[in-house]
Amino acid sequence: MKKELIRVVREPANLFLIFIFPILLTAAFGFAFGALGSGGDVQYTVGVVDNDASSWSTWFQGNMSNAGILIVTMYEDPELAYSDLETGGVSAVMVIPKGFGASIDEFLTDPASDWTQSILELAIDQGSMIAGSIVPAFIQQSLIVTMYGEEALSPPSPVVIGAPTMIESEKLTQFDYMVPGMFSFSTIFMTLVVSQVLTEERSMGILDRIAITPTTTREIFTSTILANLVTGAVQALVVLGVSYLMGFRPLGGLTGIMVTLSATLLLVVTNVGFGLITAAIAKSSSSASGIGFIFILPQMFLGSFVPAPESVSRLVPSYYVTETIKSIFLRGAAAISLTNLSNLVVLLVYSLVVVSIGIYVFKRNGKR
């Protein structure tokens, strides 16, 4: 037993699997599912256009903020608010109509009289499966607290919330909400492919034989990246084609598909870099599988299907791919929008940094 323990301790890959892998696994599950179940840091930004500007509307907005789940952002221009909704800048847009405060005053003065009813216009982010159920409920609760000072089950009200509308009238299925994450989910496993191929070639002596040929190191890494880019493009098109056959109808047209492919391919380059780092650490293809999941799990749980705190999700590259695709395919936002371009820039920087580190580390340690 002592001999086996010494062998485990001397192998850096085993230490990664024993200590770092369970830490990352637990943290990824905690951030993803813990925050979802308890509320955590998950909040929803509601863009408010206040056409009433009364003391009642101000108090109403304050109660929305006090709920702890909703963040109120004021807008003067409704078009700007709806534009931010399309690109995912806000989770909902609510328009408080003129006469909101007067309706409440009339009702509270004489509930039996013929008071005027006001309707709040509410639009929900179609790219979020959860916002559509959470946001209207908390707005309704805040409205009741504003008028009655305490929560009630179903009191008569001079103000009602209009039926929440989506950016597009088409109703989405749960599968539709999952499709953007599938592009990221399928791509992140490039880390395993690259690391296992390189460790296998190293163990078979193929890399040593290539080293004595006229082939340069730059050509080796370039061919690795290009080959995986082709694979990633085919993979993305397969995901799109199969999901279309299963009923998914993406918005955004051809331009949207091109931006989606661009974002996906940048994620491919990033995961090629993670694969190079993994291959530099691992001594065998089996240990490469375990170490590779150190890079895969955070991207899987924080940047694909599972809702997680945005502040944490922004740390992983897959988040920017999923958000870009969600913005185009589900919300129908302009493919060449400022938000999408910002996401592509982040992905470009991420891919260049990670693949550069991967090449450096593999050149230094990967051939031993």
Image (cartoon, rainbow, N blue to C red):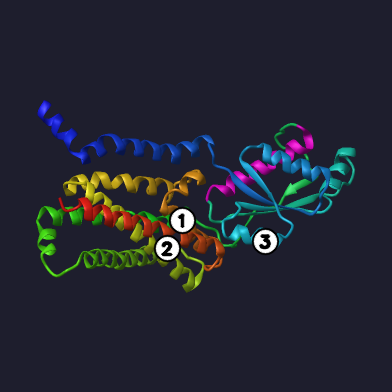
> Is 328 colored magenta in this rendering?
no
Q: Residue furthest top?
A: 2
Q: Which label number is shown at residue 80?
A: 3
Q: Earlier in the sequence, mark 2 or mark 1?
A: 2
User: What is the crowding at mark 2: few (fewer than 14 residues within 10 Å), some, or many (at least 20)?
Assistant: many
> Is residue 155 visible from the viewing direction of this image?
no
Q: Position of residue 216 (x, y in %)?
A: 19, 67
Q: Are marks 2 and 1 in contact (CB under 8 Å)?
A: yes
Q: Earlier in the sequence, mark 2 or mark 3?
A: 3
Name the kind of residue labelled 3 in the image.
Answer: Leu
Q: Judging from the image, what secondary structure is the residue with disc 2 in? A: helix
Name the kind of residue labelled 1 in the image.
Answer: Tyr
Magenta stretch secondary structure, dominant:
helix
Instruction: Give the residue pinned by disc 2.
Output: 263
Q: Residue at x 25, y 44 (%)?
A: 290
Q: How many marks on residues?
A: 3
User: What is the crowding at mark 3: few (fewer than 14 residues within 10 Å), some, or many (at least 20)?
Assistant: few
Q: Position of residue 239 (x, y in %)?
A: 36, 62
User: Which sits in the foreground, 247 or 126?
Assistant: 126
Q: Position of residue 265 (x, y in %)?
A: 37, 64
Q: Judging from the image, what secondary structure is the residue with disc 1 in? A: helix
- Quadrant of image for the N terminus: top left
Q: CA distance from mark 1 to mark 3?
A: 22 Å
Question: Which residues lie in the magenta part?
Answer: 129-149
